[in-house]
Image (spheres, grey):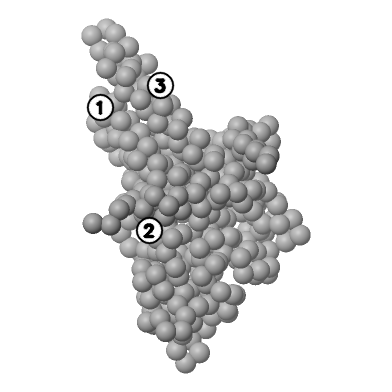
């Protein structure tokens, strides 16, 4: 029996070229001062940056087939984009629209909406709470209580008198979306124009990825397909590629902290030369290197369809704690400046904390991994 080939986790020349192009664009259009200023404004999303990413580079349709106007790329390329967006804490709906909503539409075969997303004329968002992961079912069926999914944790809309009713909370980037993909208690996934629903912003720790409450009051929706497989596919891709965003966050924090410690002096010595700080940075470097392997493994598994559930669970069981630890270390080791609103470290800290519970917590993914590997905890 021949052995399975090992996944090629190193970046290809094309992926490095894509990274350079995205980083260059973000350098010109997404400086930290601008992101901080936007979090203080009424519009958290950067529409001009999204237009540049979508129109100039075609990134909105990266995962959409070429025959529908997209780029026909794989999750590996999308992962590279998310690394760079994570480094810049870019306030754009790339993960929610170009990845999560796109995956749901691909599962349903909604070619017309996919064409709209590829052309950047439409932004879509999956109307499932940001905290829910791929292991939670969505969209009820016969014999299931209205408004609650078969898994009992993912709220969904009710179908009554031909319209959709209900309230869905914690929906990421709903305020920027043109179309919401709403799971319903009849087992279907419906496309609803955001102009037909009420979207009320909710308090979010990460102001660069706002969440909102969506209220549906008899709104008409177009049924796209079965919610269960579509939502699971979308959330699995979201969780797997979120690890690449967390990698970008952690890598920027480590790089920036090393740079700062090389420059700052105390007692006429570089602070970075102190042995205790070297040990902390070395430990953090090892954690980031491990996260890179896990994130690349998840992206490759999504691209190839090999051991995808395991790879995604491994990545998300590890990614959150590394990104948060990197942010905490960066904040402490920048202690000479304190935590000021003007410094971008606080943006990365908030994004890292918010990401740690997005698309399922680390504990949820560890439990799922235990099930997949048949290593469940013994019964008491």
The residue positioned farthest toward the right in the image shown: 67
Nearest to viewer (mark 1 / mark 2): 2
Residue 285 versus residue 197: which sits nearer the camera? 285
Q: Which residue is mark 1?
A: 335
Left or right: residue 131 compared with residue 92: left
Quarter occupied by residue 4: top right
From the image, tell me which residue sits under label 3. 259
Quarter holding the N terminus? top right
Dot 3 or dot 1, earlier in sequence: 3
Question: With respect to residue 67, does 169 lie above or below?
Answer: below
Where is residue 334, by image quadrant?
top left
Left or right: residue 26 compared with residue 261: right
Q: Are marks 1 and 2 in contact (CB under 8 Å)?
A: no
Q: Looking at the image, is mark 1 or mark 2 earlier in the sequence?
A: 2
Can residue 105 be seen by looking at this rendering?
yes
Q: CA distance from mark 1 to mark 2?
A: 31 Å
């Amino acid at each position: 029996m021949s052995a399975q080939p090992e996944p090629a986790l190193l970046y290809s020349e094309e992926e490095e070229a894509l990274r350079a192009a995205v980083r260059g664009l973000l350098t010109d259009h997404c400086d930290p001062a601008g992101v901080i200023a936007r979090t203080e404004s009424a519009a958290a999303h950067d529409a001009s940056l999204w237009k540049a990413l979508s129109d100039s580079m075609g990134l909105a349709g990266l995962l959409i087939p070429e025959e529908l106007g997209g780029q026909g790329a794989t999750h590996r390329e999308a992962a590279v984009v998310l690394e760079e967006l994570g480094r810049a804490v870019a306030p754009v709906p790339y993960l929610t629209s170009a990845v999560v909503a796109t995956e749901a539409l691909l599962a349903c075969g909604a070619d017309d909406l996919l064409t709209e997303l590829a052309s950047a004329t439409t932004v879509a968002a999956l109307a499932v709470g940001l905290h829910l992961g791929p292991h939670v079912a969505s969209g009820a069926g016969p014999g299931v209580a209205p408004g609650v999914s078969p898994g009992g944790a993912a709220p969904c809309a009710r179908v009554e008198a031909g319209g959709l009713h209900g309230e869905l909370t914690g929906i990421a980037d709903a305020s920027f979306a043109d179309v919401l993909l709403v799971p319903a208690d009849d087992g279907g996934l419906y496309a609803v124009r955001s102009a037909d629903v009420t979207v009320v912003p909710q308090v979010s720790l990460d102001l660069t990825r706002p969440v909102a409450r969506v209220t549906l009051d008899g709104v008409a929706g177009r049924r796209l397909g079965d919610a269960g497989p579509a939502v699971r596919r979308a959330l699995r891709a979201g969780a797997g590629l979120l690890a690449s965003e967390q990698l970008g966050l952690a890598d920027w924090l480590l790089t920036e902290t090393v740079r700062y410690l090389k420059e700052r002096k105390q007692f006429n010595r570089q602070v970075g030369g102190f042995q205790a700080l070297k040990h902390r940075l070395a430990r953090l470097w090892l954690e980031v290197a491990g996260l890179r392997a896990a994130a690349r493994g998840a992206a490759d598994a999504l691209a190839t369809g090999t051991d995808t559930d395991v790879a995604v669970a491994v990545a998300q069981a590890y990614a959150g704690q590394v990104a948060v630890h990197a942010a905490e270390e960066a904040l402490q080791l920048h202690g000479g400046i304190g935590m000021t609103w003007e410094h971008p470290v606080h943006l990365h800290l908030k994004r890292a904390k918010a990401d740690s519970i997005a698309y399922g917590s680390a504990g949820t993914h560890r439990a799922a991994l235990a099930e997949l590997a048949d290593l469940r905890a013994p019964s008491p």
